[in-house]
Amino acid sequence: MNRIELKLVDLYNQMYQHTNRECANTCEKPHSCCDKMYCDWAKQHAKKHWNIDLQETEEYKAGKTKYPYMSEKGCTVAPHLRISCTLHTCAIYKYGFKPGDATWTQKYFDIRNQIEYFEMEKYENQKMKWKGVTTFIDSQYKGMVTLKYKTKILIKSVTARDAYIQCMLLYHEKPSVYNLDEFEFEEEK
Ligand code: SF4
Ligand code: SF4
């Protein structure tokens, strides 16, 4: 696992600890919000984004549970592979916060914001890995470019590759300020 993936595993574990406490004394296992559809999402997510094949439990094979990954001790899927289950609580689903507990709500969104940031980083890394940064940029822009953000010129006359790196740096420094989709390259004629 690379640095971003390790960070995501840790953050989803933190979120699991945080949300699971909400359910532990409320619902018996299997939790009442479990649904085969979410198990299927976990299966697809694990394969597509982590190249992991989830294993059905003995309890499921023996017909003791409706859920493929449920055991007597609870769900066997790691928190970062079943993200909708990990992020879910009744209060967040119903209200978007936990009524009467600002501290819990603040911590939930602190962890969730970090998860969103690192998920985007993971996606960007994969995009660059798939395409190959150099071949991707060089195939699109041959000459010098002007880099714009929301039509405002940031830098003129740099190679497209340098402009792209500049976008990535700006975005990673301030992801809440910059939206990657709003950077533009304008090729000089
Ligand atoms: S993946 Fe696990 S927690 Fe999520 S719905 Fe299935 S059994 Fe429940
Ligand atoms: S989110 Fe709600 S329904 Fe689901 S396990 Fe927790 S308390 Fe139960």
Image (cartoon, helix red, strand yellow):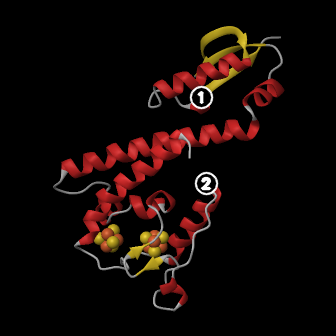
Q: Quadrant of residue 130?
A: top right
Label 2: how many Cα within 10 Å (few below 14, some 14–19, many 20+): few
Above or below residue 186? Residue 7 is below
- Comparing 32 with 118, the one in front is 118
* Horizontal relation, residue 3 to residue 13: left or right: right
Q: Position of residue 23 (x, y in %)?
A: 28, 69
Q: Position of residue 4 (x, y in %)?
A: 51, 41
Q: Image point 83% across, 27% down: which residue?
A: 139
Q: Position of residue 61 (x, y in %)?
A: 55, 87
Q: Position of residue 156 (x, y in %)?
A: 67, 8
Q: Image point 57% across, 73% down: which residue?
A: 55
Amino acid type assigned to the residue bearing label 1 in the image = Glu
Q: Secondary structure under badge 1?
A: helix
Q: Which mark is residue 182?
A: 1
Q: Image point 16% across, 55% down: which residue?
A: 100
Q: Quadrant of residue 73?
A: bottom left
Q: Image point 83% across, 11% down: which residue?
A: 189
- Comparing 96 with 6, the one in front is 6
Can you identify the residue that label 2 sits on?
Answer: 49
Above or below residue 33? Residue 156 is above
Amino acid type assigned to the residue bearing label 2 in the image = His
Tell me if the residue at label 1 has its CB under 8 Å from ligand 1: no
* Horizontal relation, residue 127 to residue 82: left or right: right
Task: Pick whichever of labels 2 and 1 is earlier in the sequence.
Answer: 2
Q: Secondary structure under badge 2?
A: helix
- Comparing 77 with 22, the one in front is 77
